[in-house]
Amino acid sequence: MQAEKTNGGAKGPKIEVLDWIEENPQKVQQADIIVGIPSFNEADCIPFVAEQAAIGLKTYFKDYRSVLINCDNHSEDQTREAFLSVETDIPKIYLSTPAGVKGKGNNFRNLFRKAVDLGAQAIVVVDADLRSITPRWIKNLGEPLFQDYGYVAPIYIRHKYDGTITNHIAYPLSRALYGRRMRQPIGGDFGFSGAMAQRYLEGQLWDDYVALFGIDIWMTTLAINSPYPTAQAFLGAPKIHRAKDPASSLGPMFRHVISTFFRLMEAFDQSWSQVRWSKPTPIFGFGLGETEMPPPVNVDEEKLYRGFVDGFKENVQIYEKTLTGDVYRKTKEIAGLSYDQFELPPALWAKIVYDFALGFHLSVVPRDELIRAFVPLYFGRTGSYVRTTQGMELRVVEDYIEEQCLVFEETKPYLVDRWEASKG
Amino acid sequence: MTKILIVDDEASIRMLYREEFQDDGYEVIEAEDGHKLTERIGQDEPDIIVLDIKMAAYDGLDLLQEIRQQFQDLPVIISSAYGAYKGDYKTLAADYYVVKSSDLSELKQKVRKALEGKVPTKKGK
């Protein structure tokens, strides 16, 4: 491999500068628009994503200098070769963290640096495992960035059981806190401006979890709290990727996302404590005709219930310290219900989330332990949601999620009062 | 005085809303369709808009997109006789969606809520 090691040319990044590995066969020095594809062992999927992205750049941004960048975690499955061998007129750059340095956030950090180096105005990022991406995604995520917007989050049709962290924590909490409705704050496919890339590169509030799966919520939260306007892009096609059963495979992602979220709450408390209710965010990209329905996601409802009930018993001491008396009593009561009867409703869930955010802030127990103990309650809420929405069409489920968001907004004074009181 | 713009092609609905909201102390202005709506908004500077979807010559959801592009933080409440439009992702660009009813309490509550929302307006939009 003809790899070149460099520290990049970005000026004065405050975040720790890691070595990166760069391969730039066409010697690209400048670009107006970049499509970045973060990856780790995605040799099977990345050619399709790169091809679609290249068509999107060629079709919709033909007057701009464009480049495809694969930001990789030193994959050992020939992701690099698969990416660089994609046949397209659009130049390609391969970037990688050094061997042993993993994390989606670390890939993004390299992308921020490269975007600033190249002087890009617009950067679109799409996941490497996407199976439903079309060239229109690049258009819809990229175009608003040439109209003064600093950040574009996606809206796509997802199966009602895909994106459970989004539906039960990230979306309702982000919306209630910061007052901006962004339906997919951790969607994985984004657009951001060159100015926003520079801001990200400054590394405000960067930490080890942001370097991993915390990157999406970090980017979204910083964008909402930046001076730059935010937008959403309707992508039409459903997000088809490797969807995960929340009962079995979301552990590290949950820990990274929620820890990052709670830590950012501390940093922006002066801002969110003043916000009441929420406002919609502009949406681009309609007019795509009929949208496809997403493929099914299988959820093991009984496993979620069992995870909740068993986890409650294991973590009862942490819950006593973290939850307020009434919330603790109600949760304990629900954990004692049989599988057929149990339900963890949105009103209680909103208070649980707020109690955990405050418990994290006050470090009522070590933070990692607190987040670990949060998982069974999340399983409880997810299991309850699965049960309630089982027979519902997607449209009705969206209404249900909207109602849950309103509950978070209505309950927010509970958080604000407790947070303020904790300052003594 | 808080100014509400009612956009609806049914005169009876506009009259009902006008009377009810005026009684509650709002200034009410009206548009019977979407003709030059964004221009009108720029001139009249309403504090909030109540927007119908299914109008004879205009689609309220298209109008909503136009409004949102130019006036990002202007509250817009969709008031439609059809609940089914709620499933259309375009409605996410509205602050709230209320199904029309002769009882205006939900609409009034949503109007108050939308006006209470405090989000700092960002530069450029």
Image (spheres, rainbow, N blue to C red):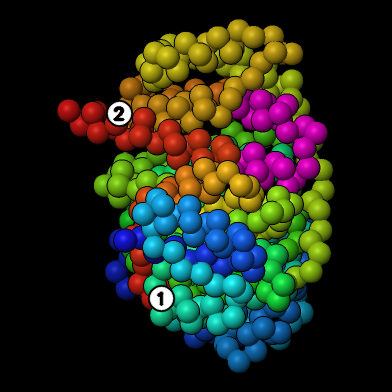
For mark 1, what is the residue? B44
In percent of the image, x 29 and y 31: which residue is there?
A: A417
Q: Quadrant of the N terminus of chain B?
A: bottom left
**Secondary structure category for the residue under label 1:** helix
Q: Which residues are magenta?
A: A379-402
Q: Residues within 10 Å of mark 1 (few under 14, many from 20)?
A: few
Tags 2 and 1 both on a single chain? no
Q: Is residue A100 visible?
A: no
Amino acid type shown at disc 2: Arg
Identify which residue, B88 or A241, lies in the foreground: B88
Checking the image for residue A359, the label placed there is: none
In percent of the image, x 59 and y 52: which residue is there?
A: B97
Q: Is residue A107 left or right of residue B56?
A: left
For mark 2, what is the residue? A418
Q: Dividing the picture into quarters, in which one does residue A421 lie?
A: top left
In the rendering, at what x and y percent does residue B73 appear? 43, 64
In the rendered view, tell whether residue A317 sits above or below residue A210.
Answer: above
- In terms of secondary structure, what is the magenta stretch mainly? helix
**Secondary structure category for the residue under label 2:** helix
Identify which residue, A235 or B109, lies in the foreground: B109
Return the chain for callout 2. A
Give me the C-alpha separation between circle 2 and circle 1.
Answer: 42 Å
Return the chain for callout 1. B
Q: Is residue A161 left or right of residue A218?
A: right
Q: Is residue B98 left or right of residue A390?
A: left
